Amino acid sequence: MSMQIGMFTSGYQRNPLEHCFQDAKEYGYDFIELWGGRPHAWAPDMTAGRAAHLRELSERYNVPIRIYTPEHNGYPYNYMLGDEAQWEDCMRYLTRSMEAAAQIGASHTLISVGHGGHTEPQYRHDRLMRSLRRLAEEARSTGQTILLEPLSPFESNTCTTAAEIAAVLSELNDPTVCTMCDMVASYVQDETAAEFYQCTGSAMVHLHIADSDGRSEAHILPGDGTLPLRSELEALRQAGYDGTATIELVSMYTDDPTYYARCAIERTRELL
C-alpha cells in the first residue's frame, strides 16, 4: 500500500519548530500537518516573517506543509456554541487560519465539528450548515480546500458518524469542503475507515492514523492499543482509497516527540 504519510506537529509544541522538519526528513515522513497553536503557528501570530520562516524550513528540509490544522473547538473558539458575536469571532479566526495556511503554502485547512452543547438537534444542524457555508466562501477566497473532520462522541455531539458526515456534505454540495476519517473516532463508534470511505466516497481525501483503547478519544502510538490497524488499513486499500494520511500523535507524546515520531512511522510503514 503506497500512502503518503505526514507528521502532525502538535507533539512538538515544547520543542523548536525546526525539530519537526529535522525529524520528518530523517525518519522519512512525506509531509507535515502543521498544528496551528502557540508557540509555533497560531494564525493570529502569522506575520509575513513567520510565514517566510516556515516556508524556508519546508524548502531546506524538502518536507512540504500540506495541511494546516488550527486549534479550535475548545477554548476559546467553537463555532457550534456561543452567541452571535462569538460565532462571528470564530468565523474571523478560522478565516485568518485559512489565510495563514495559504501564506505557508498549505493546500488544505483542517476544520473539525465541535460540540453543540445542550441544544436541539435541528438547531445544531442548522448552525453547522450555516458555519460551513460561510467557511466554504472564505476558503474559496483564500484558495484553500477544507478538510472537515468528524470527531468522536467523547468530543462532539454533532455529526460524528460516516453517514452523518456524508449527509452534511450532500446537503452542502460544495467541492471546497472535503472530509477525512480519524481512525480512532470511527473505531469507538464501531465503524472502520473502509466503511467511512465507502460511505463518503471521493469526498474522503485524508486519514488520521492512531491506535485506540476503544473507550476514549485517546490517540495512542500505533501498536499500543486495541485497534486492528493492519486489517483496517488493508481493507481501506482494498476499498480503493488512495489519499494521504497523518499519524496523529498529540499531547500524550510531548515528553519525547522525536522518539515517538520515529517509532510511529516505523510501525506504520510495517503495517502498510
Image (cartoon, rainbow, N blue to C red):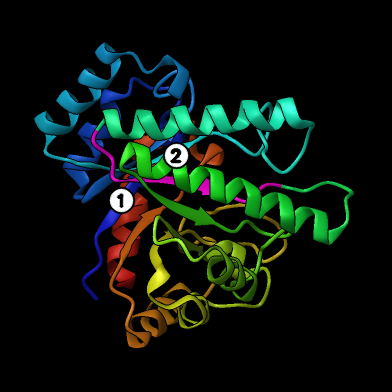
193 relative position to 213: left or right: left
178 relative position to 28: left or right: right
Q: Secondary structure at mark 2?
A: helix
Q: Secondary structure at mark 1?
A: strand
Indicate the quadrant where residue 32 lies.
top left
Taking the spot 53% from the left edge, 56% from the top edge, the residue there is 149
Taking the spot 66% from the left edge, 63% from the top edge, the residue there is 160
The image position of residue 23, as x and y in percent, is 24, 37
**Mark number for residue 108?**
none
Q: Which mark is first along the chain, 2 or 1?
A: 1
The magenta segment is: 105-114
Whether residue 89 appears in this view of the structure is yes
Q: What residue does disc 2 label?
A: 138
The image position of residue 82, as x and y in percent, is 78, 33
Q: Is residue 13 magenta?
A: no
Q: Is residue 108 magenta?
A: yes
**Mark number for residue 6?**
1
